[in-house]
Image (cartoon, rainbow, N blue to C red):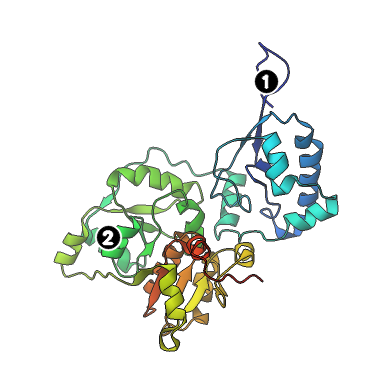
């Protein structure tokens, strides 16, 4: 609690850390599923016996914002008031303790693949990174790393990746979601080679990865793809085709061209509404479950807004799938176009 004691002893702001978020509350399963129900009970007590006793005007400043996996669906604004949350936050609605426990442990997002590593680093303390110095790699140096089996992480924009990229690269644009998604597609012990839109982003990118346990960045490709290609090295483009929801509707109506729709959101998002007949495989599970899909059958990948699905579609293209569609605008656009939504 924060108070300006030159004016009053009454606190006007609460720094809520990992407990109360904008539109959400902390998930109880991140230290292990076996402890989730017990921790959910403690969360119920904290929310009801501490936060809900505060005045409605109290400013709430949480420790996580939109995109964090520490909640189910955290709101996009940075702060809120207790009064607004009291009326609109699902976690603050009246429930018995047992009812809240059932609510808190249901529909949780998948834990990121590097979560256990993050916990271990938090317990022992991180490895000091020191000053992050640029590590430019020539094409030949990058090839040497590639031949050693180092994963290639292409963090350029979607448009740049689609225009031309190195075969086998994992595409995750350098945005606010990168640190959440990288644990789903790469192993944290991997020695990673980076491809950047702007070398000036290298320091921020290395820190972003290190904060979620990816501390082994070898460097970044300093040469352009034009240089790469001029040396006779392979590049590719067009693994994935972007289509509008209406185009997907038309494809689904054609027997000979009908794609399998793969929804890469979380289970709770899928249950709230999905394309009829879509198969649920979250982004975090896709790498492990790709064998369930036929690489010769067209696949249409959809998420909430079209961002997460781009990464998933790129992964399928990397795995050799012949026809992959990314649905622009995701389920927001599909439902907003008045197209049918199935709920189960």
Q: CA distance from mark 2 to mark 1?
A: 54 Å
The one nearer the camera, 308 or 87, is 87
Is label 2 or label 1 in front?
A: 1
Q: Label 1, secondary structure: give it.
A: loop
Q: Is residue 335 left or right of residue 322?
A: right
* Percent coordinates x, y for residue 8 in the rendering: 71, 14
- The residue at the point 45 percent across, 67 percent down is 312
| Residue tagged 1 | 3
Q: Quadrant of the C terminus?
A: bottom right
Q: Residues within 10 Å of mark 1 (few under 14, many from 20)?
A: few
Q: Is the C-beta separation of discs 2 and 1 under 8 Å?
A: no
| Residue tagged 2 | 142
The one nearer the camera, 167 or 14, is 14
- The residue at the point 63 percent across, 64 percent down is 272
Q: Is residue 165 visible?
A: no
Q: Label 2, secondary structure: give it.
A: helix
Q: Is residue 3 left or right of residue 47?
A: left
- The residue at the point 53 percent across, 81 percent down is 292
- The residue at the point 30 percent across, 64 percent down is 162
């Amino acid at each position: 609690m924060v108070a300006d004691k030159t004016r009053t002893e009454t606190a006007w702001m609460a720094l809520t850390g990992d407990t109360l978020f904008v539109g959400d509350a902390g998930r109880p399963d991140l230290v292990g599923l076996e402890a989730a129900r017990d921790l959910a009970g403690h969360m119920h007590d904290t929310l009801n016996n501490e936060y809900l006793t505060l005045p409605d005007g109290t400013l709430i400043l949480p420790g996580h914002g939109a995109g964090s996996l520490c909640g189910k669906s955290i709101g996009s604004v940075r702060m809120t008031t207790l009064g607004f949350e009291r009326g609109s936050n699902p976690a603050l609605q009246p429930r018995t303790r047992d009812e809240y426990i059932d609510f808190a442990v249901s529909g949780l997002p998948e834990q990121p693949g590097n979560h256990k590593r993050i916990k271990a680093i938090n317990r022992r303390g991180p490895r000091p990174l020191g000053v992050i110095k640029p590590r430019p790699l020539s094409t030949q140096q990058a090839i040497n790393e590639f031949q050693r089996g180092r994963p290639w992480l292409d963090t350029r924009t979607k448009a740049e990746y689609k225009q031309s990229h190195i075969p086998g690269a994992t595409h995750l644009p350098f945005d606010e979601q990168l640190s959440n998604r990288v644990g789903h597609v790469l192993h944290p012990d991997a020695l990673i080679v980076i491809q950047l839109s702007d070398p000036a982003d290298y320091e921020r990118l290395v820190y972003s990865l290190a904060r979620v346990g990816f501390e082994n960045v070898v460097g970044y490709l300093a040469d352009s793809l034009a240089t790469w290609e001029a040396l006779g090295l392979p590049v590719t483009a067009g693994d994935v085709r972007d289509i509008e929801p209406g185009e997907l509707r038309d494809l689904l109506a054609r027997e000979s061209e009908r794609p399998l729709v793969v929804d890469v959101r979380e289970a709770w998002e899928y249950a709230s509404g999905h394309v009829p007949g879509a198969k649920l495989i979250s982004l975090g599970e896709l790498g492990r479950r790709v064998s369930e899909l036929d690489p010769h059958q067209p696949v249409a990948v959809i998420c909430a807004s079209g961002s997460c699905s781009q990464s998933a579609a790129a992964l399928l293209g990397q795995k050799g799938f012949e026809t992959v569609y990314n649905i622009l605008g995701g389920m927001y656009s599909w439902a907003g176009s008045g197209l049918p939504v199935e709920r189960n």
